[in-house]
Every structure is written in C-alpha cells, then in structure tokens.
Amino acid sequence: MAAPRIHTIVSHVSHGAFFIPLVTLLMMVSCGRTARRAPSAPAIGGECTVAQVPAAIADTLRIALQHAVDISQAPVPNHYSDRLLYRQLYETLIRVDCTGRVTPSLAQAWRRKDGGRRWSFTLRSDARFWDGTPVTAALVVDSWRETGSAELHGLNPDSLFVDGGRVLEVVFARPLQSVPSLFAATEMAVIRRTTGVAWPVGTGPYQISRYDAGRVVVEPAADRRGGKPTLEFQAVRGRDPRDVIDDRYDLVITSDARSLDYAAAKPDRDLVALPWDASYVFAAARAGGTREQTADVRLGLPVEMREELARDAVRIDARASTPPSWWDQLADCHIKPAEHQVASERPQQGSARIAFESADAVARGLAERIVALAGAAGGRELLQQLGVERELAESVASGMTRLQAVALSKEDYGRELLSGNSMAYVLPLQRLSMAPCRSASDLVARASWMVPSGSTEGGATVLQLGRVVVPLVDTRRHAVVYRGSMGLAVDWDAVPILLVP
Amino acid sequence: MNLRSRLLLAFTALVIIPLVAAGAGIRYYVGAQVSEQFRQRALALASVIQSELEHEGETIGSVLDALVADIEADNVFRRAALRGEDSSRQYLLDYAGSAMRLGGLSMLQIQDTAGRIISSGHFRNEYDRLEPELPRALRSEPGRVMLASARTAAEPFLALVRLDSIRLGAIGFDIVGGVSVGRPFLGRMAAGQELAVSLVYMGEALSSDSLLERTLTRVISETNGSESLDYGSLLTNQIVTQIEVPYLVPDMGGISSAGILVTHPLSPLHELRRGIDLWFAGAVLITAVAALLVATWLAAVLSRPLADLARKTSQIDLDRLDVGFESARKDEVGTLSLLLGSMTERLRNSAAKLKEIERRATVGEIARQVNHDIKNGLIPVRNVLRHLEQVAQDDPDRLASVYQERQATLRSGITYLEELAANYARLYPRVDRRPCDVSEIVRQVSAGLRRSDDSLIDLDLGEELPAIMGDPVALRRIVENLMRNAVEALEDGAGTVKITTRPLGDPRTTGVSIVISDTGRGMTESELESAFEDFHTTKQSGTGLGLSVVRRLVLDLNGTLRVESEPGVGTTFAVELPRGDDG
C-alpha cells in the first residue's frame, strides 16, 4: 500500500509589499504541523501550490462542500464553503497568496500616488464578464456599490474615481505604504447582476451552469475552455466525512481527525495541510477588572498551557495560538459602539457559565478543559489570566461559585454572545484578516460588550480587543485530494484555488 | 309541632341516622384498607429497589471486570499509560469515554495510584486532576456500590459507583464506574406507578415527581438539611418508606448516608373518600327527600280526616246538631268519627230535652208574668168597680156621672189586658202542621209589609222548592218577624232588604233555606249575643219577643237559624228548614 503524500506550506515573507499585520500573521502560517504524519515532501512548484497540476484530468471534478451555498448572496461569504466556491468563480482586483505575496488578478498593474494616499489600478484589458461584457472601472465601482463591500471596508463612494475605461483610483484617508490587501478580500470580488439569472455574473475562468439546493455545477467560461473540466460542488453537510471520502470526491476539505486518519490510510488520497486559519479565543464578559488587575496578573495563557490545550483538549489539528493576531493591531481602528443590547437568560445565582456553540467540538473541548482546570489547583490564577475578574475567579476557585461549560444552539449562542450575560465565551475567529478594522467591527457587532465603556473618542472607540480576547489555540483544515485529479494553490485565507492544465 | 314535622323527625331518626353511621363506617373501613394497600405497595417497591440497586452494583461490577480485561489486553493503552507516548495520548484521553458508552455506564474515570485522573468518560477534559479521595473511600468497602457526586463540565450528577483495580507493570490503576442516579433513574424505579421514588442526600433532593421534589427541597431547607429526618411525618398526605444507601462524601473525608424514599400519595385515598362522601351525601339527600315525601303523604293520610273531624266538630252547637260524622274507615279515625257521631246524637237528644225544659221554664216565667200583668191590669178595673159600687151604694144618682168619669180608666185597663192577651197569644201559638210553600208565604208577607218609599225589597225566590211540613201561621210568623225586623232596621227607612229562598242541596237534609239580609244599621257583638233573649228589644214599641219567638218556631220545625251582622253594614238571617215528615 503506497504511503499518502502529505504536503505542508512553507511561507515566505514578501518584504515591503504587504500590509504589516498580515505579514506578521502570515509568518505563523509555516509554524503549523501536519495532522498525523511528518511532511514527506516540499511544496511542488510555487510555495503555495500544494498539489501539482496533473498531466491529464477528468472531464468532471467533484468537490465536497461542508455547507450549502446561497449563490444569490455572492460574493459576500458566510462560511468557508462560500469562499471555496466563490474563489473559483469571481475575481478580485488583486490576489494574496499563502505567503502574503500580492499577484495580479482583475488588475494587471497598480501604482502608488500621493505618498500612498491614492492608489491607481489598471484593469486587465481582456477582462470580460461571463456574458462577454468587458470589465470597466465603472462596472467595478458599480459592483462594490451593489454588494456594499466597499462601504463595508470603509471606502466612501466619493473616494472611488474612474479614470478612463480601465483605470480605477482609490483615495484613502491615510497614506498606505503597501498595496491595500483589502482588495483581495472575497467580498471585494467584482460581479454584475443581469436579469433572468439567479446568480451574479462574474469574471473568473468558470461560470455557473446549474444551481439547485446543495449542488452547484460550474463550467469553463466560453472563451476559456481549452480542456478545462466541469466542476461539481456538492454540499455534504451532516454526512460522515469518511463516507464522503469513500464516495470518490476529488476534493474534500475537513478538520475531522478521524476522517484524516481514515483518508491517510487510503492509497489513492493525498492529504494537504492548509494554513492555520482559525484561532479559538476566550473572551471574559465580566472583564471589568481585567485592565486593573493586569498590574499583577498578565493576561494570556502561558505557551505551555496553550500547547497542552492544543495537544490534549481538542481533537483536531491544533497548535498553541501564536501572537500577534489581527486583534492586537487595531490602533488605527475607530469603531462606533453598538447601541443595541439583547436581553438573555441570566445564569443562575451561584453559577458562572462559559458558553460555546454546541456544534463546535473544539470550543466544547476548550471550555470543558478550562472548567476542569478552574476547579483544580491554580484555578484562580488561570481564570485571572483569562481575564475573569478577581472576585469571581476566587469564588469559582474556592467552589463558592460553580463554573459550567454550557453548550448553546447557534441562535442562542448568538444572543448570549451579544448580551454578555455569561461569564465568558469560547469562540473561533478567523486567524487572518485582510481588513482588521472590518473584522473588529464584525466582532463587536456580535458582542457589543467587548467595547469598553469610557474609552470613546468623539463617538468612536479605539478598540483594544487584545485586552478582552485571550487566544487559546489555532486550528487548520486539511484537503483530501484524489491523487492526480487536480492541482491546488492556496491563498492567504487557506482557501485553495483549483489548478488544471 | 304539627304531625308532619313529627313524622319528618321520626323518619330522620329512623333512616338518616343509621345511614350516616353506615357511611362513616364504610368511609373509615375503606380508608384503613386502602392505606394499608398503599403501604404494602410502597414496601414492595422499596424491596424491588433494594434488589435493583444490588443488581445495578453487580452490572457495574461486571462491566468493570470486562474493562479491566480489555485494558490488560490493550497495548496502546499500556504504552500511553506507562510510557506517556504522545502518539497515544489522545487515545488514552478518549479511552474512558468510549468504554463508558460501550459499557452502558454514565460515569467512568481511570486514576493512577496517586489519584490522578488519566482518563475520564463523563468529563473527558478533566484529565490530570488529582482526586485520590474517591477511590480511597470506595476501597474501604470493597465490592460495595455507593452513591457519589460526579463532576462534569456542565453540572455535577449523582451516580451509583463501584471500584475496580488493575495493575499494569509496576503501576496500579483504579477504575471507578457508575450509572447516573438522576430523575430518569428514579422514574424508571418508580415504573410509572402512582408511587414516587426520591433521593435525599446532603441537604438536596431528587425525585421522579417534580412536585414532590420541590416539597422535599422545601422541607430540607426548613430543617436546615438535618440528616436524620422523619420524612414520614414531614411529608403530609404521603405514605413513606425509606431505604438507606451509603453516600460518599470525599471532600468531607468519609461515607455518609443518603435516603431513597418510596412514597405513595394519599391523594387517591382522598379522592376515594371524596367519592364516598359525594355518593353518601347524594344518598342522604335522596333519603331525606323520600322521607319528606313519605312523611307528607302519611301526614296527609292521617291528618286530613282528623282535620275534617275537627272542622265538623267546630260546626256543632245547640242550634246545629245535624252535623254528620259517618265514616267507612275501620281504623282509629273511623272509630273516632263514630264516637263523635254518637256524641252528636246524644247532644241532639239532650238539646231537645233542654229545649223542653227551657220551654217549660219559659212558660212558667210567662205564667208568672201573665199573672203579674193581669193583676196589674185588673187593679184599676177593680178600683173603678169598687168606686162605682161605692157610688151606687152611697149616691146612686151620681152613678151615671161617675161612670162617665171613670169609663176611660176602665176601657184603658181593658185595652191593656186585650193587648197583653194578644201579645201572649203570639208567644204560644198553636201548631197545625201541613205542607207549606215558603216562597208563597214570603210573597204574601212582602205584599202586606208596610215600608217607606225609599226601601227596596228584593225577592230572589227559588223555583220548585220542596214543601215544608209545618204550621203555616208559624212559618208566616217566622218570615214576618224577620222581614219586619229587616225593614225596621233600615236607617231612615232607606236601603235594601233581600230575601232569597233556595232548596237545600244535601238530599239527607232536603229542605229550604231562607236568607234575609238587610243593609240596615247592623248589630254590635253584644247586641247579637242577646238578640234572641225574650223581651230584649232595641225598638221603642217592641216587646222584645220577636226574635225569641222566631228562634223557638224554627226549633219547633227542627230547623236552624244563623245570624251574621256587622254594625253599619247590615244583618243577615239564614234559616234552614227541613222538609219534615208528611205524616
């Protein structure tokens, strides 16, 4: 039986052409370890090409999606499956690969002006929508306006200028030294809505030919066929990933340890560890004393404890969360605090809750381990390191207050997180962000109590999420590829792009 | 108290009181029997639970035995437990969870000799925690199943636990396994019966019945969690049987005891009693109604003839002794009727005799009166005669003139005597019986009656009246006296006198009734009482013998005379005359 080939990605820092937080974050991408076996071979081809393009390819490739996709919402993603699909269909101005290197996409060139306040993008001359319409700068602006993605990233419509047919200029409030990586964010992809079609028309090499519940079939765009296969994306939510692997899917992306073990034993499958893309953090809602107690208690768990959590408490490929993270790089972000508060069920007196989403096994393992440790020797110090206020930490450690790990449904968890009624929460965050301010804004919208009171400046708040969010472990997914079926290259957010001849 | 009330009370005493006594007796007897049944059921379930606990202990023991054998054969476990190999670390941590689920346990933790948890099934991520107290306490009573509190990340639960041990290489391991003793467990024990199974331990309570659990929690908190509570007396409306189970309190360094309470609510008994009460109340009500109806019927059967007798008796007086007391009944009422009839007959005879005596006395009185009156009337006559004799002897020439002088006195005396004679003649008429037409007599009297223009005599005379056997003069005197009195009673001669004649309806007393009513001044009660006395009169020219004569004449005809009068309204005389014998 042939041993499966397992690839890891070796990142290279592209100096001087990248957004600083992203660079620092991407430094950690290479620190990951494979799930079950030591690396057997270096990356094939480019650093981000994790599966080499085969010489011959099947007419149809089947790709499993963990979630059903609502294509009408494209290109704004809700989950990883959306990103995987949209990455094959829609193009952004630029691309950022797994090493952080910026490469052309819809824009073939860009230029810094006015000391970095103004950036000019020149569109590819042969860029066409699927229906043959040439892509112009005006249509790019229209696309962002329609999806609202520009405003999501703080780009005022007045700051977008069209210079001729193919040149788009963007003016920023503050000068940027490197090309703004936000233009590589999935939601910034360029689309156009046309009548009679249920999904947005894109500019990528593939276009949608059929779409029904849980199944999306895409085919090469008319002008780009040349032997490209048809791609069939099928939602497999609820099925055992091992069954999906047995079902001869050409690409299955999963983090399930048992499934990876299972796939590793199959001689016709290759396992590819994708970059660390998620961080599980602990956020203490009753963190009123956190900032005051930092004088004698250092917020954050020791690396040994984080490693122990990654090794023993969770059952997927994990490592100790490694700073810095995007939430530590928010000095330039001013967030308007959310005004709404949602009433939620108060925990019983005499108990404190660590809430997590019931479907998230990693969050469950971490929450339960913290409950176990809190009741053992050193529990008080642990809780204080996690940001729990001193009195509550002492009460829990002494047994006066019973600490509970509480699993909540997605909806209940959303309400609970918004209300901040639980003592703390274990939640996953995207580890990398092309737009940290935008990510911070999204997080605060989910948990308004994370904005500390009294720190507003002129109605806006300088976020210091690093004083609320305590990172625990990083996790990553693995791609299970049917050997010789396709090549894969991985972008900054651990989303692969299919490579075909 | 009337007869109906007496009968009702009698029925109450005779029927309802025994019924109440029977109901109370049934209620008490059923209550005692059902309570005993409940107690027996609670005891039986307690016995079953005791067996179940032992069975659970054996089951846990067999699962732990199998687990020990499995661990001994498991090299991955051995490497992870003895050498701490990283590659087997996850396997070790997950081992207890898998084994627990496969073994059907709710709790399983594997600890090394120091008490460090190396694998926990119910709290997977509690690994490395030091907890030597639990295996130590279990080891103190080998093979025994006990209750212990098991931690989880969410909330602790109570488990029935048992200990087993294994040695791998030089290291010994304790395996503590158990099953959850929560509400589902207790509910399974209760087996869906009316019985409830509860567990009380360390100031807390669990029960298969949520309401009972709240009650127990309240009772325990009110008694400050005292360990030795008599739940039988604390739980009202429950039959309680208690089983003691050892309870491990590792933190407190020893073994305490928990109580499994098997309770049977008395509410079904109360319900039964309510049902009995309801049916009994219904029976009493029905009985009372029946008693009331029977009493009413009996009272009617008994009292109606008595009331009839009382009414007839009240009609009896000397002028009305013709009341009949005939009865066909053979009972006491019939006897009483016959006795009263007999008494009335005797009274009638006595009255006749009395009337004769009275008549004779009256005649004697009249004779004395006549004697007196005649003597008085003769005195002036005698004096005139003596005067004339004296004149004739002494001075015959003046005889004529003296006669002329005394002639008026003489005639006056004679007139007085004639009137006196006439009056007395009316008091004692001669009886000459023959058939008389009463209506005709009334018409004749009415025609000759002197009256004023303002008065009206209204005749309502019945047709085909039976002829009355009697003296037509006496009948005429009866009618004439009553009609004259009526006319004279009219104030200033104005008003109406109405005379009605009718045949009497009763065939046994066939006769004629004569009713004479006027709208005159009427009589007072005292006047009415003495109206029939001789020589009593309210008129200036009356003799006071009219009504007295009428009364005697009516009695002579075996008739009755009644009078009703009201001052200012008028007077009514009713005469009823029997037809009398033809012979």
Image (cartoon, grey):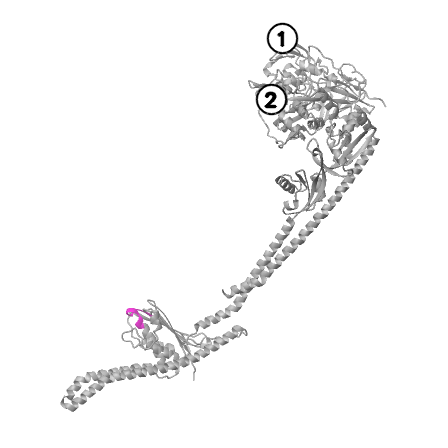
Q: Secondary structure at mark 2?
A: loop
What is the quadrant of residue A390 in the picture?
Answer: top right
**Residue drawn 86% across the image and 23% down it:** A1
B107 vs B406: above or below: above
Residue at the spot of label 1: A115
What is the quadrant of residue B526 in the picture?
Answer: bottom left
Q: Earlier in the sequence, mark 1 or mark 2?
A: 1
Q: Position of residue A307 (x, y in %)?
A: 73, 21
Q: Position of residue B487 (x, y in %)?
A: 31, 72
Closer to the camera in the image, A211 or A446: A446
Q: Main secondary structure of the magenta part?
A: helix
Separation (CA) of disc 1 from disc 2 = 33 Å
Q: Position of residue B8 (x, y in %)?
A: 54, 63
What is the three-letter code of the residue carrying label 1? Gly
Label 1 neighbour load within 10 Å: few <14, some 14-19, many 20+: few
Do discs 1 and 2 share a chain?
Answer: yes
Do we see residue A350 in this rendering?
A: yes
Whether residue A339 is in magenta: the answer is no
Q: Chain of mark 2?
A: A
Q: Where does the magenta region start and end?
A: B487-496
Do we see residue A19 in this rendering?
A: no
Residue at the spot of label 2: A451
Closer to the camera in the image, A339 or A90: A339
Whether residue B493 is in magenta: the answer is yes
What is the quadrant of residue B102 in the picture?
Answer: top right
